[in-house]
Structure formats: structure tokens, C-alpha cells
Amino acid sequence: MKLFKVSVFSPLKKAFESDSVTSLVVPSYEGKLGILANHAEIICKLVEGEIKVDLEGQKSTFLKINNGILYCKNNCVTVLVKQAAYV
């Protein structure tokens, strides 16, 4: 399975980072958004909710977030949020 990199930042810290991600689901303004490797370039508004990160060969990781934005380009996803915490 193809992999991509995900980084989640809050103003105080880097909440999550991995380059072994197989899929990502985020709570966007228009509903849940799923991202896989080689996704088209996108910028979207995020709302309060839960991010699900599937890692290669591991259990899913969940983060609770507040509002923010997501930027995806060249198999690299950057998520900027007000707050992020593991669930």
C-alpha cells in the first residue's frame, strides 16, 4: 500500500507526525474527508471533531481537534489546528 506523510500542529506543539500513513479521515466543513496517497492538491477548512490516522502495520491513531485547516500536496498533508489531543 502506498504511504504518505501527515503532520498535525497546534500553536504550542507538534501533536503528531508520521511518514507511514496509509489513510487519513478529517472532519471538514463540508463533512468527513478521506485522504489516501497521491490525493489531489487540496486546502480545506476543518471543524471540531476527530482525526483518524491509519498507520502501516499499526492500529489507528485518533486525535481530537478544534477548528483549523488542512493542506495536501505531493503526498504530504499538513494540518494546522487550535488544539489537538490524543483520544
Image: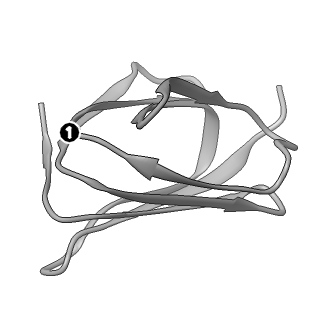
Residue 30 versus residue 14 in the image, above or below: above
Q: Is residue 62 left or right of residue 26?
A: left
- Element type at marker 1? loop
Quadrant location of residue 37? top right
Q: Where residue 59 appears, x then y in whole percent?
A: 40, 19
The number of discs equals 1
Q: Is residue 65 left or right of residue 47?
A: left
14 and 25: which is toward the camera: 25
Q: In this view, does 47 lie to the left or right of 85?
A: right
Residue 28 versus residue 5 in the image, above or below: above
Give the residue drawn at x 75%, y 41%. Answer: 3
Quarter of the figure with the C terminus: top left
Give the residue drawn at x 13%, y 59%. Answer: 83
49 and 59: which is toward the camera: 49
Q: Where residue 21 appears, x then y in whole percent?
A: 60, 40
Outermost bottom residue: 12
Give the residue drawn at x 82%, y 42%. Answer: 39
| Amino acid type at mark 1 | Glu
Q: Where residue 60 appears, x then y in whole percent?
A: 39, 22
Residue 44 versus residue 54 in the image, above or below: below
Quadrant location of residue 68? bottom left
> Would you name the residue on which mark 1 appears?
48
